Every structure is written in structure tokens, then in C-alpha cells.
Image (cartoon, grey):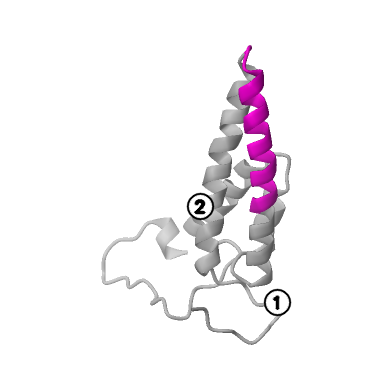
Amino acid sequence: MRRPRPFQPFEKPVPGELFVWVKRISYVELVIFLGLLFFWIAPGFKTETMIFGWAHGLGFCALCVVIWIACVRHEAPYTLLAGTLTPFGPIGSVIGIELIERKGWGIARPEAAPLPSTGGTSQSATERT
């Protein structure tokens, strides 16, 4: 269960349990969106286009709500919500999630996570930053 933290409005968010769900829903929505694009471009798939269109519409609304809740709970940065609301939709959310996870953009390091030790081994440029 998540411990409540004192509210500090300008503190960077720390990914939590809800961020994992944001990631899962983003990838599912991306697959649905790609399926919609395929059936929309390919001729003769009117029913499939309608089904994937409805699935994408409802899924995208759900994705935006879940990301917004994660932002309010300080588990995701608001830039992830902004990236999702671009015309790219679920592609923007997946790119935002990858930037958050790989580069640490817009988030703070969890308090319980230890800093990576150098131990005399060589590090890449991304590990040093």
C-alpha cells in the first residue's frame, strides 16, 4: 500500500504502482491504435475499422484519465499527459514513458532506491548522468 507523502506542489513525481498500470495501458492502447490504422488503410475492412475505432476511442479516454490520476498522485509527470494529448496519442505516451524510464526525465529518484555504484567499472554516458 502506498504511504501518503506530504503535499509539495513543485516536487518531482516518483513513479509508483499506478505508473506500472499507465505503462501497461499505454502499450495496449498503442496496439489497438496500430490495428485501427491497419484496418483503416486496408480496403474492405469497414466492420473491423469500426470495432478498432471504438476500442481506440474508449481506450484512449481511459488512458488519459489514468495518466491524469497518476499525475495528481505525483506518480507521473504532467509532461507525460501532455505527450499523450498530442495528435500522436498513444505513440506520444509510449515515447514519454520510455524517456521517463531510460533517461529519468521529469521524475525524482525513489527514496528507497540506492544510487548505482561505480565500483571502478567503466560506465556509459547514460549511466553517469
The image position of residue 72, as x and y in percent, is: 69, 70
Secondary structure mainly formed by the magenta segment = helix
Give the crowd class for mark 2: few <14, some 14-19, many >=20 residues within 10 Å: some
The residue that mark 2 highlights is 24
Amino acid beneath label 1? Phe
Q: Is mark 1 on a helix, strand or loop?
A: loop
Which is nearer the eye, 111 or 21?
A: 21
Q: Where is residue 69 in the image (x, y as percent from the top left)?
A: 67, 65
Please count the marks in the image. Answer: 2
Q: Can residue 79 be seen in this view?
A: no
Q: In which quarter of the image is residue 54?
A: top right
| Residue at x 58% of width, y 43% of height | 29
Residue 11, percent across and down? 65, 77
Residue at the location (57% across, 67% down)?
A: 107
Provide the residue designation for mark 1.
Answer: 10
User: Is 47 a magenta residue?
Assistant: yes
Residue 20 vs residue 95, the one in the foreground: 20
Query: Judging from the image, what secondary structure is the residue with disc 2 in?
Result: helix
Q: Which residue is drawn at 49% across and 58% down?
A: 101
Eyeballing the image, is 26 above or below 106? above
Between residues 2 and 75, which one lies in front from this camera angle?
Answer: 2
Which span of residues is magenta-colored? 43-63
Specify which label sits upstream in the sequence, 1 or 2: 1
Residue 111, can we see it?
Answer: yes
From the viewer's perspective, tell me whether residue 67 is left or right of residue 85.
left
Marking on residue 65: none
Q: What residue type is labelled 2?
A: Arg
**Whole-number angstrom distance, CA of label 1 to CA of label 2:** 27 Å
